Amino acid sequence: MWGCGWFNGTGLVEELPACQDLQLGLSLLSLLGLVVGVPVGLCYNALLVLANLHSKASMTMPDVYFVNMAVAGLVLSALAPVHLLGPPSSQWALWSAGGEVHVALQIPFNVSSLVAMYSTALLSLDHYIERALPRTYMASVYNTRHVCGFVWGGALLTSFSSLLFYICSHVSTRALECAKMQNAEAADATLVFIGYVVPALAALYALVLLSRVRREDTPLDRDTGRLEPSAHRLLVATVCTQFGLWTPHYLVLLGHTVLISRGQPMDTHYLGLLHFVKDLSKLLAFSSSFVTPLLYRYMNQSFPGKLRRLMKKLPCGDRHCSPDHIGVQQVLA
């Protein structure tokens, strides 16, 4: 899948053993992501959404945010095969960079990335509110659902403005409105600032506040109404994982924007290397779509019970349940 065209600057392309090993390793990694990561991401994200929606009464504030991230993960998992089989450096390219398909695929990708990053940042902030001010219902399930709705709306609006930059960078210069906006790097700079810098600062601020709360020995820590201790470990693991996997993608966008804004022509070797690093960083970003639900599955103590309740109800959709079995289900409910 992956080529070594960016080695052209050295005069050696396929003769280098390191190039062949790198090409083989990345091809295996991409195939592993397609064969294992995409099905696991689709399966676990779907189970996370269905299990929590089936047990709405027992959903907590973190559950709402994880359902929100799971929906974004479903979109990323569905887009992963097209992106991983179609980067410019791939020998199986299904589309070319800058084409109409590429621009169209950027819309759901950018929306999902914004939703995932802001859901992670808001989860850390609301978790701090829940620990510092328990029983105030400021970080309640009801409020969180409305916040998630605003997150999706804001992501759509931000992606729409970035989409205008991408579209105007590929249309004729005769349109006066687009002639002033023909700068795709401006869209990347907007996404880096809004989609990464802002949520990263918010998450870092929340983690600092949470560390201060945990160092204080107060009666609040013995409040039975607070979130379970595993929720804090899940929060820290999710924040570190999400930002760790998405940071290379946004750093590459920032580096590409800075290099283009200098106005100096780039060497073919460095341009190929930039595209290679961009594809590799996007591969890491797509891996977050199945890593996050796996963290939720193994670190959330209430999720296995929700999943068992969902699994017990599924067989009744294929065959008629006996009256006694229905009565037992009602008693258990």
Image (cartoon, grey):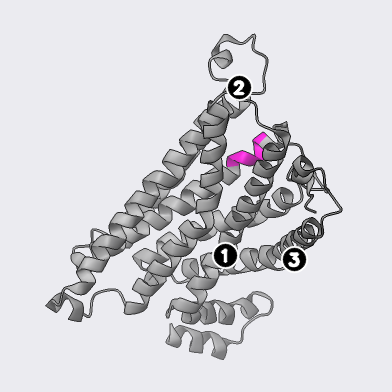
Where disc 2 sits, the SS reads: helix
Outermost residue, right side: 15
Label 2 with label 1: CB-CB less than 8 Å: no
Q: Quadrant of residue 36?
A: bottom right
Q: What is the span of residues highlighted in magenta in the rendered image? A: 103-107
Query: Quick check: 155 above or below 228?
Result: above
Earlier sequence position, callout 3 versus callout 1: 3
Mark 2 or 1 closer to N-term?
A: 1
Q: Nearer the viewer, residue 141 or 41?
A: 41
Q: How many marks?
A: 3
Relative to 325, residue 44 above or below: above
Magenta span main SS: helix
Q: At 50% across and 85% down in the image, what residue appears?
A: 329
Q: Amino acid at mark 3?
A: Val
User: Residue at horizontal 50%, vertical 89%?
Assistant: 328
What residue does disc 3 label?
A: 35
Give how far across and how far down residue 72 sits, in percent: 54, 54
Circle 1 Cα neighbour tier, 10 Å, few/some/many (<14 / 14–19 / ≥20): many
| Residue 223 relative to residue 202: left or right | left
Establish if 276 lies above or below 239: above
Residue underneath mark 1: 45
Residue 301: quarter of image: bottom left
Image quadrant occupied by the N terminus: bottom right
Q: Mark 1 is on which residue type?
A: Asn
- Residue 321 visible in this rendered orientation of the protein: yes
Q: Is residue 105 magenta?
A: yes
Percent position of residue 151, x then y: 42, 46
| Residue 153 visible in the displayed image | no
**The stretch drawn in magenta includes residue 69:** no
* Residue 9: quadrant of the picture: top right
